[in-house]
Image (cartoon, rainbow, N blue to C red):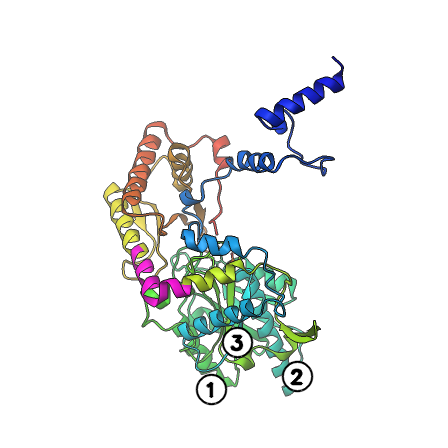
Amino acid sequence: MSQAELGEQLDALARQYGNRFLLEAAPDNQLPEHGMRSVDAMRLLGEELVLDGIPMRNLATFVTTWMEPEAQRVIAENLYRNFIDHAEYPQTAEIEQRCVRILADLFHAPGETTGARTQGSSEAIMLGALSLKWKWRERCEKAGKSTDRPNLVFGGDVHVVWEKFCRYFDVEPRIIPLQPDKYTIGPDDVEPHVDENTIGVAAVLGTTFTGHADDIVGINGLLLRLKSERGLDVPLHVDGASGGFVWPFLYPHSEWDFRLEQVRSINVSGHKFGLVYPGIGWLVFRERSDLPKDLVFYENYLGKTDATFTLNFSTGSAMVLAQYYNFVRFGRAGYRYIMQTMQANTRRLAERLTDIGEFRFVGGENEEQLPLVAFQLEGEHDFDEFDIASQLAAERGWMVPAYTLPPNADHMKIMRALVKLTLGHSLVRTLADDIAEACATLKKKGGLHELDRKRVKTGTGY
Ligand SMILES: Cc1ncc(COP(=O)(O)O)c(C=O)c1O
């Protein structure tokens, strides 16, 4: 039998019994000359993806890992709808605006306002911070002052996107270092950094590192004082990537939003505690005038003028629709119930970890915080938090991150577990038992070998 005949025979057998790519490498650097059956392509991907972690065991991520089947159906049925095509899909555009209005109301906007759907909080922050820069320039030009050296003030507790904005858009970052025993910022930290070239101050509601909030009331008070004493009108942007969907339901009386005068814009990730799958964020302004006209592009598309304020253009509509699905499905009562459930299980996990007797928690019991447990080892051990994270992953596949805090609190090693809806009562018990088990193993065998240490992940997760 010739080589070609043999090849044909093998192909025929593969078509009937398997998948040609079980015997060949998956294409990884060239578009293959011939494709494969759809079912084979699906199987190829399925087989590759088992190497990824299981999202529901990922206690590092803030991002939603589970949605209801009905929401999944809404998503699946709307994947082809290009969000930017407002002329063809006007109702999708209307639903986006409903979401913006619902969020503006949730965040106590004083009147009619505006905002936008974004890819996530990162895009929302880029757009929000650009608005701060534009508004600052307008103020400077009106006052006949130089517009050469804009700066932005924020704490070391922010997400990397804030520094990214500064680098991409040529703004001096004024980063306030954390302190050895203080992991958020307040007015006294901010004051020395603010001057007439400050385009704004960014404060975080629910930091990636410990889940606590900056002293937003205090910073607002400082900015009001600077306005009345020095004539400096510095806006405050709240990065509520995670906290924007948590605080309104767990801490409704805590003021962090447009109830505070200097808060001019807020971002929030729909795909975090907004409970939507990845790919949706929101930017909401206090008033329409906080969005500089110059940043909105008008174009004539299919005979209709359309306004866009976005860094991207074509993108999916499915997550916008899924966000609206959650709003109408849960309402305030539903979101409150879900956040309270997560909080109750967070407390349960903290209690179980207390019983182990090896850990202390970051932050006081009554401090406002995202539904997460941030903890560290107490006392002397032959192993550390990174070792526990690695052992826990090896024994049970849990992804509980270990990391150090930003400067000047970088001596602090922390572990952090997000307690989302998929971590119910009994899994919380299992997780705590597994952490105890991992510690018991490490006590017997000692910490990780240097080579293993190098492989331990050291990021916070997002
Ligand atoms: C406080 C904070 N800001 C911004 C971001 C970036 O958000 P996104 O991943 O939605 O772009 C994150 C993500 O973890 C965050 O925790």
Along the horizontal axis of the image, is 249 left or right of 193? Answer: left
Callout 3 secondary element: loop
Label 2 or label 1, whichever lies nearer to me, is 2
Kindly report the distance in space between the C-alpha atoms of the residues bearing marks 3 and 2: 25 Å
Q: Quadrant of residue 14?
A: top right
Residue contact between numbered discs 3 and 2, judged by CB atoms under 8 Å:
no
From the image, tell me which residue sits under label 3. 114
The label on residue 240 is none
Looking at the rendered structure, the kind of residue marked 1 is Ser
10 Å neighbourhood of mark 2: few (<14), some, or many (≥20)? few
The answer to which of 179 and 67 lies nearer the viewer is 67
Looking at the rendered structure, the kind of residue marked 2 is Glu
Percent coordinates x, y for residue 163 in the rendering: 57, 61
Residue that appears at 62% across and 29% down: 21
Label 1 or label 3, whichever lies nearer to me, is 3
The answer to which of 104 and 434 lies nearer the viewer is 104
From the image, tell me which residue sits under label 2. 141
Q: Looking at the image, how many numbered discs can be counted on the residues?
A: 3
Q: Quadrant of residue 134?
A: bottom right
Does the image show residue 368? Answer: no
In the image, the segment drawn in magenta is 327-341
Taking the magenta stretch, the answer to whether it contains residue 338 is: yes
The answer to which of 174 and 65 lies nearer the viewer is 65
Which comes before the other along the chain, label 3 or label 2? 3
Residue contact between numbered discs 2 and 1, judged by CB atoms under 8 Å:
no
Percent coordinates x, y for residue 273 in the rendering: 41, 59
Residue that appears at 45% across and 60% down: 178
10 Å neighbourhood of mark 1: few (<14), some, or many (≥20)? few
